[in-house]
Image (tube, grey):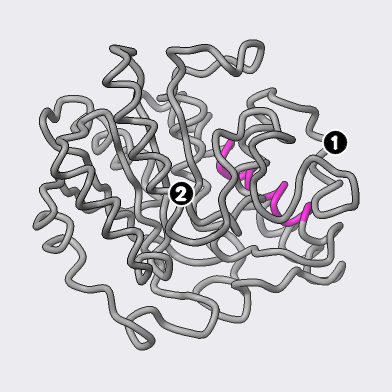
């Protein structure tokens, strides 16, 4: 991508993070760490890669994105609002009674959400099914999904991985948000999922490893996915939980704790000056 596009996508990732902080501070609850860590991936997919139309969200040949780690919904909601699926002012209704923006994505209520997720492991299974269905229907569309590293301790992730690899589902691209933190501590200390690359390769996936905050590496990995045949693609994205807010970065306490108004003010100042 050229410098102007890189600058645009970097600014969108920053805006996603700004909205995440504002939403969680207003709600008084939610999950900042894993929402902040995936901002560049969302920026690239929603504003460069995916064929989607907010004016026609059910278009048959649209690309699909499924957030399997549904607790990171604030990041998804921010991307959808910035893309124009609903007004940005709706974001401050996060987790409120009767809001269409609940703590986990809800397909029926929220424009642009492809699947209701939150029970960890299930989103990837739905993504595999959608990708298979599109192929059987001869519809030229890709399915993208994002899973967590703590989520990768779930058996259903590996059932889905086995199915997609066996069926050679090459219109499926999955990002692993690999920040090595889950609700109780280090993934590597609670139930280590390593060696990650070798495991996905064993399930017949094309596997890439990138810096999940580097937009150029994200672009190159997606381009390689587009050229890959007879295998689904796994992009292992090394990220920092809480990225962009210094006191949240790589801190397990910010997995599921909303910032106070004072903390939000400090975070927003950092993001706006970053």
Whether 21 is among the magenta residues is yes
Please indicate whether residue 227 sits to the left or right of residue 108 in the image. Answer: left
Q: Main secondary structure of the magenta part?
A: helix
Choose the circle earlier in sequence order: 1 or 2.
1
Q: Secondary structure at mark 1?
A: helix
The residue lying at 50 percent from left, 33 percent from top is 9
- Which image quadrant for residue 135? top left
Residue 204 place in picture, x, y as percent: 10, 48
Q: Position of residue 140 (x, y in %)?
A: 32, 14
Which stretch is magenta?
Answer: 12-23
Q: Residue at x 45, y 53 (%)?
A: 122
Q: Residues within 10 Å of mark 2 (few under 14, many from 20)?
A: many
Instruction: State the residue at coordinates (15%, 46%).
Output: 205
Q: Is residue 131 above or below residue 274?
A: above
Q: Is 209 on the left-hand or right-hand side of 274? A: left
Q: Position of residue 8 (x, y in %)?
A: 53, 29
Image quadrant where residue 262 sits: bottom right
The N terminus - image quarter: top left
- For residue 176, the mark is none
Residue position marked by numbered label 2 in the rendering:
123
Magenta segment includes 15: yes
Marks 1 and 2, Cα distance to the nearest angstrom?
A: 27 Å
The image quadrant that residue 82 belongs to is: top right
- Residue labelled with disc 1: 89
| Left or right position of 101 against 271 | right
Counting from the top left corner in percent of width and height, residue 191 is at 33, 83
Horizontal relation, residue 72 to residue 197: left or right: right
State whether residue 159 is above or below residue 82: below
Between 222 and 228, the one lying in front of the other is 228
Q: Nearer the viewer, mark 1 or mark 2?
A: 2
Residue 212 seen from this side = yes
């Amino acid at each position: 991508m050229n410098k102007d596009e890189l600058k645009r996508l970097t600014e969108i990732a920053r805006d996603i993070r700004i909205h995440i902080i504002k939403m969680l501070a207003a709600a008084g609850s939610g999950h900042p760490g894993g929402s902040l860590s995936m901002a560049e991936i969302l920026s690239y997919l929603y504003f460069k890669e995916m064929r989607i139309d907010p004016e026609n969200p059910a278009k048959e040949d649209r690309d699909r994105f499924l957030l399997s780690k549904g607790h990171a919904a604030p990041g998804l909601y921010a991307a959808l609002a910035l893309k124009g699926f609903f007004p940005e002012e709706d974001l401050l209704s996060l987790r409120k009674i009767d809001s269409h923006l609940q703590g986990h994505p809800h397909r029926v209520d929220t424009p642009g959400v492809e699947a209701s997720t939150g029970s960890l492991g299930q989103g990837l299974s739905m993504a595999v099914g959608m990708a298979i269905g599109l192929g059987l229907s001869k519809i030229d569309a890709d399915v993208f999904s994002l899973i967590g590293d703590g989520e990768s301790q779930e058996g259903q992730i590996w059932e889905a991985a086995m199915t997609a690899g066996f069926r050679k589902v090459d219109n499926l691209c999955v990002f692993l948000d690999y920040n090595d933190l889950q609700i109780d501590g280090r993934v590597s200390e609670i139930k280590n999922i390593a060696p990650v690359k070798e495991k996905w390769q064993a399930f017949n996936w094309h596997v890439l490893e990138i810096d999940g905050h580097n937009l150029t590496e994200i672009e190159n990995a997606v381009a390689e996915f587009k050229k890959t045949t007879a295998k689904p693609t796994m992009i292992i994205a090394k990220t920092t939980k809480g990225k962009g807010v210094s006191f949240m970065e790589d801190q397990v306490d910010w997995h599921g704790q909303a910032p106070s108004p004072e903390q939000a003010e400090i975070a927003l100042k950092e993001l706006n000056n970053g």
